[in-house]
Amino acid sequence: MMEIEILKKEKTPENVIAHSIAVCKKASEIALNFPEADKDLIRKGALLHDIGRSKTHGISHAVEGRKIAQQYGYGEDVLNIIERHIGAGITKDEAKKLGLPEKSYVPETLEEKIVAHADNLISGTKEVDVDYVIKKWRSRMDEPEDNIKRLIVMDNELIKAFEDD
């Protein structure tokens, strides 16, 4: 599996690789609800979403990850998944406050949303629910309410809409 080899080559910590594999499994599970989703793109993006953690564990790992994956020749579709996977996305204003390059990091495509949300629902290698994520964000962020609203919208779109099927 090429992406795993790249993670290892970049000296990505083993726990991050294990997390990425768990996110890939969860993203693949979510993608089953969407026949139109590009499953190969989701797999690549999910496996590489945290490659930037080989350089930093800060919020900028998404920006660093994009740079690393770009060096391996990945296209914009994979690069955007990596860059936009943080939480339920980060707006341009939030990015400025966080010291990131000033632009929107909110997932736009179905594949970006699936990987970002799968990442939210995996803590380490264990699956968690949205309530767990909300509690975690409330304890770690100064003003998480806008992020929580985006998280709930994403969960409704990707998970809740299919629970009764």
Image: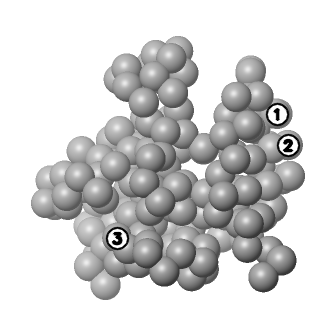
Number of other residues with Cα within 10 Å of mark 2, as a class: few under 14, some 14 to 19, many 20 or more: few
User: In this image, 9 relative to 101: left or right?
Assistant: left
Quadrant of residue 84 within the rendered picture: top left
Q: Nearer the viewer, mark 2 or mark 3?
A: 3
Picture quarter with the N terminus: bottom left
Residue drawn at the location 73% of the way across and 37% of the way down: 149
Residue at 45 percent of width and 22 percent of height: 92
Mark 2 falls on what kind of element?
A: helix
Residue 15 point in image, percent of width and height? 55, 66
Contact (Cβ within 8 Å) of mark 1 with mark 2: yes
- Of labels 1 and 3, earlier in sequence is 3
Query: What residue sits right under mark 2 in the picture?
Result: 135
On the image, numbered disc 1 is attached to which residue? 139
Instruction: Say above or below: 37 vs 50.
Output: below
Query: Helix, strand, or loop for circle 3?
Result: helix
- Report, in whole angstroms, how far the alpha carbon at label 1 lies from the one at label 2: 6 Å
Please state if 77 lies on the left or on the right of 108 as rendered.
Answer: left
Tell me the quadrant of the picture where the C terminus can be found. Answer: bottom right
Q: Position of residue 75 (x, y in %)?
A: 19, 58
Query: Between marks 1 and 3, how big is the CA–CA gap?
Result: 33 Å
